[in-house]
Amino acid sequence: MTDNNILELEIEDIEGIGPTTAKKMREAGVNSVMELATAVPDELCADIGGSKETAATFIMAAQKFLRESGVLDNEFTTADVELEKRKSLLRCSTGAKVLDELLRGGIETQAITEFYGEFGSGKSQICHTLCVTSQLPVQEGGLDGGVILIDTEGTFRPERVDQIARSRGLDPEQILKRIAICKAYNSSHLELIVKSIGKYIDDFKAKMIIIDSVISLHRAEFAGRGTLADRQQRLNGIMHKLVRIAEIYNVAIVITNQVQSSPDAFFGDPTKPAGGNVIGHASTYRIYLKKAGNDRIARIIDSPYHPYADVRFTVNEKGVDDIESDSPKTKRGAKDKDKDKEDEAD
Ligand SMILES: Nc1ncnc2c1ncn2[C@@H]1O[C@H](COP(=O)(O)OP(=O)(O)OP(=O)(O)O)[C@@H](O)[C@H]1O
Ligand SMILES: [Mg+2]
């Protein structure tokens, strides 16, 4: 979708942007029409001065430009056109067939897929596996592109990717070369990385962007009640930017999130995602992960079109994988909900 002609365009080509404004934008890291179209008004306004309205006008002008060039869809389409478009979306295999079925074909491009769950529920294992599967050719269930992985918890292990690639009969050397790792050290650093991610998507020809996890830094730094509003506002900035990035760059975005309670806390619902509405509203799909003995259970929450269902998968040397004995236990419906109560004891 990132057409070469569009990449060559300068921000001065957008109506109303003169050399001075363009210079300020470049100093703030906004180097292309694509980057301008994905900017957040508040941030842009802080960077270039002037009013928020002016900043918003520039962003909308850049989006309009992309629409006219066919990079972005028109604001209004008919439902049949939308259905055709959805059929052509790429979907990336998670590595486990049951999980792909749960997601109706895999992780979608132009969407944000959120995995949340307790520690050890398999969030980072899914991220490691996606680093491998997303590089497969499209006909084999991949996105045929590079991967950008933003690690905020220091849990990314190239050795694990090597093992997953080998176990899947792939060349680990080739796979590791196409994964760009970025370690985010604090919340401001994460915000900065997300802000400038457009450039890296182009540089690494990335089709999959993973943030593991999106909330840990903000959660740790904005601990007190008094700072909650500030934290939410900053998370909101990240999420809004991600929504636009997914659409404009046609990439799949995967984020992980924690649950509200931590092992040392007495309060909080261990089945509720952290981050409140800010993350929930921006995520296209939310998947809750839970440990169940040696297996894992995945459940899709509040999806616009997925039926309520649970699936069971496992974690092994291939990363996330189907449970070998594909018994009826691996696919369960709403009537099996009661069984979860037993699993809760695991
Ligand atoms: N090579 C492996 N083979 C089999 N299982 C593995 C392997 N590596 C990790 N695991 C399993 O994955 C679990 C860790 O899962 P993961 O790191 O994805 O948790 P998480 O949901 O990211 O937790 P956190 O919230 O702490 O980040 C381990 O407890 C182990 O059961
Ligand atoms: Mg993890």
Image (cartoon, rainbow, N blue to C red):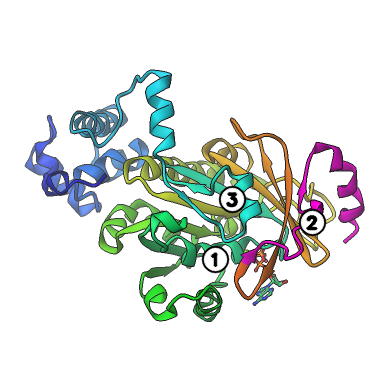
Horizontal and vertical percent position of residue 217: 55, 60
Q: Gap in Å between the C-alphas at discs 2 and 1?
A: 23 Å
Q: Residues within 10 Å of mark 2 (few under 14, many from 20)?
A: few
- Judge from the rendering whether residue 183 lies leftward or rightward of residue 106; answer left or right: left
Residue 223 visible to an observer of this rendering: no
Which is more N-terminal, label 2 or label 3? 3
Horizontal and vertical percent position of residue 290: 75, 55
Give the labeled residue for mark 3.
Answer: 100
* SS assignment at label 2: loop
Q: Residue at x 20, y 53 (%)?
A: 27
- Judge from the rendering whether residue 303 lies leftward or rightward of residue 331; answer left or right: left
Asked if the magenta segment contains residue 250, the reply would be no
Residue segment shown in magenta: 320-346
Give the labeled residue for mark 1.
Answer: 129
Which is more N-terminal, label 3 or label 1? 3
Horizontal and vertical percent position of residue 55: 27, 33
Horizontal and vertical percent position of residue 287: 64, 47
